[in-house]
Image: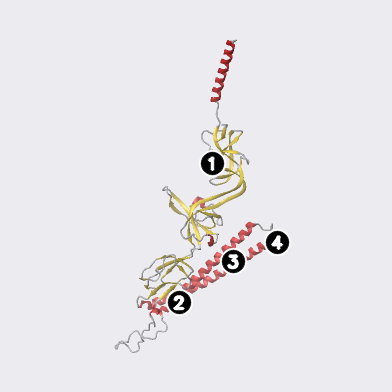
Amino acid sequence: MHKLIRRILLLLFVAGLAGAIAYGMRPMPVEADLAAVERGAIRETVDQDGKTRIRERYVVSAPLAGRLLRIEFKAGAKVEAGKTILATIEPRDPDLLDVRARQQAEANAKAAEARLEQAQPLLDQAIANLDYAQADLKRAEQARAANPQAISGSEIDNRQMMVRTREALVRSARHAKDIAAFELDQARAALVRFAPQGADRALAKADAKDDASTAPAPYPKSEDDWRFKIPSPINGRVLRVFQESSAVVTAGTPLLELGDPRDLEVAVDVLSRDAVKIKPGAAVSLEEWGGDKPLNGEVRLVEPSGFTKISTLGVEEQRVNVIIDLVDPPSVRQSLGDGFRVEARIVIAEAENVLKAPTSALFRVGNDWAVFRVENGTARQRVVHLGIQNGLEAEVTQGLAEGDLVITHPGDNVADGKAVRQR
């Protein structure tokens, strides 16, 4: 009896040991990170650093040769159109009265008159386009008020965007006309310098040997009449002072650079292969500019000419400038100035309510994309067809269903048919 019991215990021990060995040699499930395939919105963007810049810069130059008095303005100083005197030039010597210079000044005045005449039709056209856009927006708002289903909210937004764009064009056309008028005033003022008015005294008595018929040369009544003052052509601020100290300057010497810091645009250089995907009017999100919320922008221009740039890794890249208009009003970006860095996300494709999976779950199988889908605790390799992609998600058009679990960042230990479990 005791022998039988010992044999039974021995058999049970051997069976337990064999079971333990078999259990230890059994394939263990691979731990993996899982993510669910879900529906939602997806957006593909081109992300690149950009730099703000003032849209319209104005370089004020010396309209004639003479001695420039010291310029007291510093960068950032506020100027008013027609009121702020930017610089003062005194005549250097009598060659300001040269006949050739006079003829050149008259030609400059005629050219300035032509530019002013050319600016008026452009302003009229911009105003007409603005009036049409405002009327179109008003009609759309009235139609939506009468029947909310008649016009969608996005169409109203598009018309509002058109109105803001046309308003900017009107402001730009008015600036151009103001500049043309300013140049005309400058050219006419230069002509006045050649023919001083109201002079009633002689420079000196004629020498006794001079011809008695020679008329005495007139000169201005006061010292201020000798000086030529250059007023500001625009409302804005001084960006740079090229010539601060007093010096003798020639006509055309740059003196100051002016601009309106509120009238900003953003220049972003992107790879040429990305530039071909970007269309004018594309929405842009401007981030990391220093504010609490991203700024909204819109692509105005993809420049038709590229340039070569050396990357930080020393690789030559062909890049293209993309010019972006800021949609938000200046009141929400008062601290943003000229030459500030921003991170631009340019939308090249987007979709709503699509099936999407994390890009970390995708891998190549030949020329196809594939994922590991978890079915009853087992990894199954599935080929998928993709649509819109970005750095985090990809639209799945075929191969997966909503709610499917896929393995993210699959390692070499994951294979088709392998048992897996959530890490």
Provide the secondary structure element on which disc 4 rests: helix
Q: CA distance from mark 2 to mark 3?
A: 33 Å
Q: In the displayed structure, would residue 190 be above or below residue 380?
A: below
Q: CA distance from mark 1 to mark 4?
A: 49 Å
Q: Nearer the viewer, mark 2 or mark 3?
A: 3
Q: Nearer the viewer, residue 208 or 202?
A: 202
Residue 372's disc is none
Q: Residue at x 56, y 22 (%)?
A: 19
Q: Residue at x 60, y 38 (%)?
A: 405
**What residue is shown with label 2?**
188
* Marked residue nearer the N-terminal end (2 or 4): 4
Q: CA distance from mark 2 to mark 4?
A: 57 Å
**What residue is shown with label 4?**
146
Residue 130's disc is 3
Instruction: Identify the amino acid type marked 4.
Output: Ala
Q: In the displayed structure, would residue 40 be above or below residue 58?
A: above
Percent position (x, y) of residue 305? 48, 56
Provide the secondary structure element on which disc 1 rests: helix
Percent position (x, y) of residue 362? 55, 40
Instruction: Identify the amino acid type marked 1.
Output: Ser
Disc 4: CA contacts within 10 A as few (<14), some (14-19) or many (>=20): few
* Marked residue nearer the N-terminal end (1 or 4): 4
**What residue is shown with label 1?**
360
Q: Nearer the viewer, residue 148 or 278?
A: 148
Q: In the displayed structure, would residue 310 be above or below residue 80?
A: above
* Marked residue nearer the N-terminal end (2 or 3): 3
Q: CA distance from mark 3 to mark 1?
A: 48 Å
Residue found at the very far front of the displayed protein: 2
